[in-house]
Image (tube, rainbow, N blue to C red):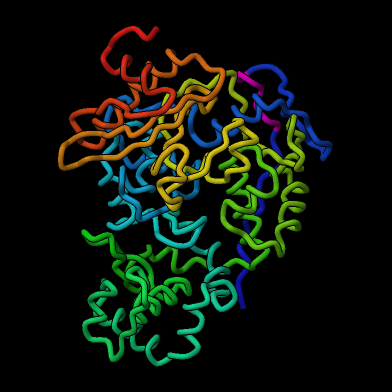
Amino acid sequence: MATRMSTRPPAPRRGPAAGGSGRSTLDSRNHAAEELSLAQARRIALAAQGFTDPVPRGEVTRRHLRRVFGRLSLVQMDSVNVLQRAHYLPLYSRLGPYPVSLLDRAAYRPPRILFEYWGHEASLLPVELHPYLRWRMARAREHAWGRMRRLAAEQPDLVRWVREEVAQRGPVTAADIEQDAPRRRTGVWGWAWSDVKTALEWLFYLGEVTAAGRNGAWARMYDLPERVLPASVIATPTPDDAEARRQLVARAAAALGVAAAPELRDYFRLPVAGFREAVEELVEEGVLVPVRVAGWRHPAWRHRDAKLPRRVRRATLLSPFDPLIWERDRTERLFGFRYRIEIYVPAPRRVYGYYVLPFLLDDRLVARVDLKADRAAGVLRVPAAWVEAGLDTGEVAEALAAELRRLAGWLGLHTVAPPERGDLAGALRVAMRGEQVP
């Protein structure tokens, strides 16, 4: 029987005024929807995502990392490494250049404060969220991918054997176990998982094994949770499903600042069942405040602690997998910026490029740039750069040139190559030479 955790929030507080003084239009203790302009909603969202927090001037420490994860609750992982792995970039966008070993140690060295699991997609999450994701582990037979479920049903002996191997030998990779596997079947395509890998991912979804680390080939190293996660996390009682949903919706709302239902549910990829009830209960508790955002057709809510800054001052590139923009409809509603990642689009059909990063300048997405880290040559390649319609090309080019130099330095690259194509390429080439942009 699951044990209910007590996580009732304190009494609702009045929201802060814009700029920190006076009565704010965000103040509300009732359920009548407040009115927000689109510009206000953008600034609230950016503040909630950490873009108004100060960038560290000195050494970036674990304290700064905790602050970012306190804001975001998770970062998405992805295997594409044409520029930098996806989970490293959101911290760069918020903290500036930082040692990626800081994130690696937080996730894979004691005392661990992060763990891998299915949050949004494959994600790094604070360890304290582990209990609130056990409902997903318990429902693997309903929600895991078909191949994993079929293998678990058809080859239970293999699954048991693989778990025993992890228990005896962990931390261990799939390749380590495959050498001794009683049976191996690889699919037709080169990227298809073997049965051993499929069994490991099934056990990972169940929560019976977890990621103890990553090897040099970016392969998961599996081990038992009790040997990886802090003992206090393992000992934490499992909340009931309703409590877990409330906590995850509240976390999503805090990370988004202001959100409509689709992105609020999408943040942790929550099922439809129970979502409406969680929102209604959080409204009753004062955690969520109903709002109407100009131009949005969806009902929306802001988190009670959301801040409305007078302005946002930031110039940074964003990962295609950054939580600010990963829900593409929300990105278009908030910023008027239509964004689709084109990695899986055949080259002749790509509009902007293979690995295109949006450029955030203050509270707007003003440009997008296709980037590639040529590590062998020590060069940051810029296959394309594009500016949004109606903007000052010179101002955008100057800011983007500075950001490209900063990014290249963080990546350990010595040079930024001139952009090759795009309607911002000419102005950006001039700005990168240090000349005045006409």
Q: In x, y percent, where is residue 100?
A: 28, 44
Residue visible at 66% across and 53% down in the picture: 8
Residue at 70%, 48% in the rendered image: 261
**Residue 180 to residue 418: above or below:** below
Q: Nearer the viewer, residue 160 or 218?
A: 218
The reply, left or right, for residue 293 in relation to residue 393 is: right
Q: Nearer the viewer, residue 159 or 148?
A: 148
Q: In the rendered view, does 222 fall on the left or right side of 73?
A: left
The quadrant the C terminus occupies is: top left
From this view, report whether residue 302 is shown above or below residue 147. above
The part of the chain drawn in magenta is 14-20
**In this rendering, does residue 225 appear at all?**
no
State the residue lying farthest toward the front.
Answer: 348
Magenta-span inclusion, residue 11: no
**Residue drawn at x 77%, y 34% as measured from the top left:** 292
Residue 266 in view, yes or no: yes
- Residue shown at 25% from the left, 75% from the top: 175
Residue 6 picture location, percent across and down = 63, 59
Quarter of the image where one finds residue 302: top right
The answer to whether 307 is drawn above or below residue 265 in the figure is: above
